[in-house]
């Protein structure tokens, strides 16, 4: 199975101080992260191995230790890398000018497409809860903060209610995460991702209560 993350850029992390200084080094690091995505995605953290990662990457074992001290280190770097890729996928889906509601629809659409193309993300992020709880928490706190920023911008512009809070951002993120699980990972029925993002858009725009309530 080949790498499914060739479009993701290598991301410096606090955990990994051995950053490449040349283009060749950056390409090697990218190969290792792409290979780690497949290795962890297929085998899980505990069954995955450094030799499996280097074999998939087509690089020498010594090259691994040029950038990472351990399997744990590359796993932590991979969680950060995936978090940054989710952010980029959402940003790439947004074009200006766009209403605050349309921004949320397109950000979700971008995430759903990314998850469809990189299904390993759910297994890897879920395992992070146990392998590295700090990176797991940071992943979700960072996403919620970005959503909250968008909601607050929409509120300041008069497009959203003025009483939106961090709790609303977490609720919206929870919806997006489980929509991705159902329609990007488990989508056996071939449902359209546009249909899914439109349904979420309608929920945000109209709510679910009847007018008399």
Image (cartoon, rainbow, N blue to C red):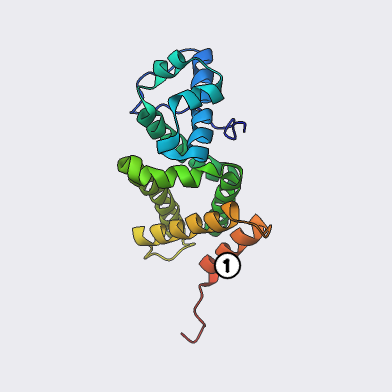
**Of residues 47 and 35, the one drawn nearer to the viewer in this rendering:** 47
Whether 208 is drawn above or below 74: the answer is below
Residue farthest along the front direction in this orientation: 47
Residue at the image position 52 percent from the left and 17 percent from the top = 59
The quarter of the picture where residue 171 lies is bottom left
Whether 57 is drawn above or below 187: the answer is above
Q: Position of residue 19 (x, y in %)?
A: 41, 19
Q: Is residue 94 visible?
A: no
- Left or right, 101 with respect to 130, comes to right
Residue at the image position 45 percent from the left and 52 percent from the top = 150
Q: Position of residue 205 (x, y in %)?
A: 54, 67
Q: Position of residue 158 (x, y in %)?
A: 46, 62
- Residue with the mark numbered 1: 202
Whether 78 is drawn above or below 134: the answer is above
**Of residues 207 and 85, the one drawn nearer to the viewer in this rendering:** 85
Q: Is residue 176 visible?
A: yes
- Left or right, 201 with respect to 189, comes to left
- Left or right, 51 with respect to 194, comes to left
Q: Residues within 10 Å of mark 1 (few under 14, many from 20)?
A: some
The quarter of the picture where residue 4 lies is top right
Residue at the image position 39 percent from the left and 62 percent from the top = 168
- Left or right, 148 with respect to 191, comes to left
Q: Position of residue 87 (x, y in %)?
A: 49, 42
Q: Name the quarter where the N terminus is drawn.
A: top right
* Secondary-structure class at tag 1: helix
Residue at the image position 65 percent from the left and 61 percent from the top = 195
């Amino acid at each position: 199975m080949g790498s499914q993350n060739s479009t993701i850029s290598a991301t410096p992390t606090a955990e990994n101080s051995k950053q490449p200084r040349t283009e060749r080094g950056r390409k090697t690091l990218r190969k290792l992260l792409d290979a780690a995505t497949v290795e962890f995605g297929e085998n899980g953290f505990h069954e995955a191995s450094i030799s499996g990662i280097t074999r998939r990457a087509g690089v020498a074992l010594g090259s691994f230790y040029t950038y990472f001290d351990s399997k744990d280190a590359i796993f932590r770097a991979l969680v950060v890398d995936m978090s940054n890729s989710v952010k980029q996928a959402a940003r790439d889906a947004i074009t200006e000018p766009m209403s605050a509601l349309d921004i949320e629809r397109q950000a979700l659409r971008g995430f759903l497409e990314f998850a469809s193309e990189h299904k390993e993300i759910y297994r890897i992020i879920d395992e992070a809860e146990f392998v590295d709880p700090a990176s797991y928490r940071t992943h979700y706190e960072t996403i919620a903060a970005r959503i909250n920023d968008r909601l607050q911008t929409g509120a300041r512009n008069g497009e959203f209610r003025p009483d939106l809070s961090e709790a609303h951002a977490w609720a919206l993120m929870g919806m997006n995460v489980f929509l991705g699980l159902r329609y990007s990972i488990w989508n056996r029925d071939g449902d359209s991702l546009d249909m899914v993002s439109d349904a979420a858009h309608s929920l945000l725009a109209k709510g679910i209560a009847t007018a008399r309530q």
